[in-house]
């Protein structure tokens, strides 16, 4: 028996076009739930059910070894299609054990963490219930159309701190067995268990206004927990501090275009007492002069692949810090090893797919040479 996580994402959203791959806190929206499922040890496979080639390409670029794509039919990807329809289409088309555990996850609930999935799976396993859904407590007073209070006595209005509140379905995840879903045609059946998540998790992303508020909540409640104290900031050059273009004068001199906003970013880092450096595979006087202009503390040129990581380890040894205290921004495969090992990794929006697939890397909204370093610096300080 195994546990399958199923995340249905279609390309035809009307309110927010292609919202499932739209950047949310620096990552495609679907990344956050896929990541949670990928890192949940109890989950064996993560299935993304989509009708969109763009979504398919995006999720495969995450590089998650549990992740597979299911090509859902156009019929079950229409505006009027239910989640149950694509879920049943998948289950009827694959050969699964009837006792396998099936976890339905909705990509529009990015607050979902691997700890929630692990605890939810364990909670259902240890209970006598048949299925489970995630909910949040909402402390609001509800009324019906007939003017009747639903969840409190208006004659004895409770204080918020004394009010138990009401459970609301937050749409994050549902757990059942394959046999139950096929038998009842529904994600839930029989005796139902409730897994409780924080109140902010009830925010789902269906409209543009939801997006702005959800990003605020994500940064406040989720990403802040992962924030590390950065003591060393390092950057690649070509494709990061520059636009990756190669410019030549009539005399054959090589030229590079840098961005002044990035220069200000290095100044802000110095003012914040964060050491700075440049590590690049190139070896030119241009970079040497730019490094001097930026007043960086460290400059390593001619470093490829593992050489960048070794150079960074040497700097860390001199400073008496670990790689967890290092932030690095790179854009191509020769940055892969270093980006995979530092405490905080980022890449420009036009970085290569292999770099974008690094777990937890921050994909910036800005292209290389257009202020990507400054955007990264702003997020750090």
Image: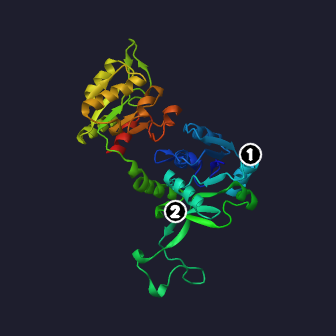
Tell me the SS state at disc 1. Answer: loop
Residue 8 appears in the rendering:
no
Compared with 120, 234 (above or below) is above
Tell me the SS state at disc 2. Answer: helix
Q: Residue furthest bottom?
A: 155
x%, y% of residue 252?
Answer: 40, 12
In terms of depth relative to the viewer, which is nearer, 333 or 373? 333
Mark 1 and mark 2: Cα distance apart in space: 34 Å
- What residue is drawn where x is 39% and y is 51%? 225
Q: Is residue 327 left or right of residue 69?
A: left
Which of pointers 1 and 2 lies earlier in the amino acid sequence? 1
- What residue is drawn where x is 59% and y is 62%? 133
- Residue 202's tag is 2
How many residues crowd mark 2 within 10 Å: few (<14), some (14–19), many (20+)?
many
- Residue 199's tag is none
x%, y% of residue 245?
Answer: 44, 24
Q: Quadrant of residue 365?
A: top left
Compared with 225, 374 (above or below) is above
Compared with 317, 161 (above or below) is below
In terms of depth relative to the viewer, which is nearer, 278 or 261? 278
**Do residues under tags 1 and 2 come within 8 Å of each other at their CB atoms?**
no
């Amino acid at each position: 028996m195994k546990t399958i996580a199923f995340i249905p994402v279609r390309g035809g959203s009307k309110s927010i076009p292609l919202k499932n791959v739209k950047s949310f806190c620096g990552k495609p929206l679907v990344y956050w739930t896929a990541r949670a499922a990928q890192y949940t040890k109890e989950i064996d496979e993560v299935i993304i059910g989509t009708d969109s080639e763009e979504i398919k390409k995006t999720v495969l670029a995450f590089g998650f070894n549990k992740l597979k794509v299911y090509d859902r039919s156009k019929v079950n990807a229409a505006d009027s299609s239910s989640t149950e329809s694509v879920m049943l289409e998948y289950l009827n088309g694959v050969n699964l054990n009837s006792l396998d555990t099936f976890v339905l996850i909705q990509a529009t609930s990015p607050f979902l963490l691997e700890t929630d999935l692990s605890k939810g799976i364990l909670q259902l396993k240890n209970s006598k219930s048949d299925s489970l859904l995630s909910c949040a407590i909402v402390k609001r007073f509800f009324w019906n159309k007939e003017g009747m209070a639903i969840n409190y006595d208006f004659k004895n209005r409770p204080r918020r701190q004394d009010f138990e509140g009401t459970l609301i379905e937050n749409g994050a995840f549902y757990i059942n067995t394959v046999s139950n879903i096929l038998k009842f045609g529904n994600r839930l059946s029989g005796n139902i268990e409730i897994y409780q998540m924080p109140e902010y998790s009830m925010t789902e992303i269906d409209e543009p206004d939801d997006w702005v508020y959800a990003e605020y909540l994500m940064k406040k409640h989720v990403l802040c927990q992962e924030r590390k104290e950065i003591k060393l900031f390092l950057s690649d050059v070509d494709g990061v501090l520059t636009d990756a273009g190669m410019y030549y004068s009539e005399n054959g001199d090589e030229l590079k275009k840098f961005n002044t906003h990035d220069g200000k970013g290095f100044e802000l880092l110095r003012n914040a007492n964060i050491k700075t450096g440049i590590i690049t595979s190139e070896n030119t006087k241009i970079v040497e002069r730019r490094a001097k202009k930026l007043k960086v503390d460290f400059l390593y040129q001619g470093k490829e692949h593992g050489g960048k990581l070794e150079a960074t380890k040497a700097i860390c040894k001199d400073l008496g810090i670990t790689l967890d205290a290092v932030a690095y921004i790179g854009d191509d495969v020769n940055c892969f090893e270093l980006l995979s090992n530092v405490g905080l990794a980022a890449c420009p929006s036009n970085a290569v797919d292999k770099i974008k697939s690094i777990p937890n890397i921050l994909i910036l909204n800005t292209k290389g040479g257009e202020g990507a370093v400054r955007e990264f610096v702003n997020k750090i300080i």
